[in-house]
Image (cartoon, rainbow, N blue to C red):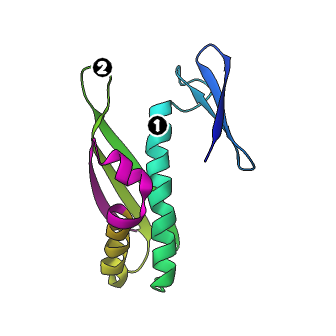
């Protein structure tokens, strides 16, 4: 895997993955997301991909999926994530809750490489919310 990150001026950077697109980061939060928010989004996206694939294999129907990512940071520099909470919000039947929780657990414990990396420094909590 390779990315190229280019300074665009002020605290703005564009990061590109070949053949996949680009994303704008902004330390001032005016024209793009912060690098730390991008890290949280990466965790949410990595796990969400796993959850979707696992639920499809389990033949669990769901209408929508959102992942709310929240992190507490240390007070001292470098300000790193201490606790991360991922809330998986799905439109699905209550009868599917156990399978959905199992899919989330499998992602966190076995499949999501971003979670494995972040877990070395941060505690990751998960919740499932059905709508």
Q: Position of residue 9 (x, y in %)?
A: 67, 15
The residue positioned 35% from the left and 43% from the top of the image is: 70
Where is residue 97, by image quadrant? bottom left
Nearest to the observer: residue 25 or residue 15: 15
* Magenta stretch: includes residue 113: yes
Q: According to the image, label 2 marks what residue?
A: 77
What's the distance in space between the residues labelled 1 and 2, CA to CA? 17 Å
Q: Position of residue 1 (x, y in %)?
A: 60, 48
Side of 85 where 112 appears, left or right: right
- Choose the circle earlier in sequence order: 1 or 2: 1
Q: According to the image, label 1 marks what residue?
A: 37
User: Residue most toward the front?
Assistant: 1
- Element under label 2? loop
Residues in magenta, as a range: 108-131
The residue positioned 50% from the left and 55% from the top of the image is: 45
Mark 2, other Cα within 10 Å: few <14 / some 14–19 / many ≥20 = few
Side of 32 where 103 appears, left or right: left
Q: Are marks 1 and 2 in contact (CB under 8 Å)?
A: no
Mark 1, other Cα within 10 Å: few <14 / some 14–19 / many ≥20 = some
Examine the rendered structure and indicate whether residue 131 appears above or below residue 124.
Answer: below
């Amino acid at each position: 895997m390779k990315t190229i990150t280019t300074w665009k001026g002020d605290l703005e950077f564009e990061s590109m993955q070949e053949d996949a697109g680009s994303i704008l980061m902004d330390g001032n939060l005016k024209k793009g997301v912060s690098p730390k928010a991008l890290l949280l989004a990466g965790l949410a996206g990595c796990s969400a991909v796993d959850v979707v694939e696992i639920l499809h294999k389990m033949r669990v129907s769901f209408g929508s999926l959102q992942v709310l990512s929240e992190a507490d940071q240390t007070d001292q520099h470098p300000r790193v994530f201490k606790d991360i909470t991922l809330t998986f919000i799905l439109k699905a039947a209550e009868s599917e809750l156990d399978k959905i929780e199992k899919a989330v657990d499998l992602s966190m414990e076995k499949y999501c490489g971003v979670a494995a990396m972040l877990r070395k420094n941060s505690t990751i909590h998960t919740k499932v919310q059905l709508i």
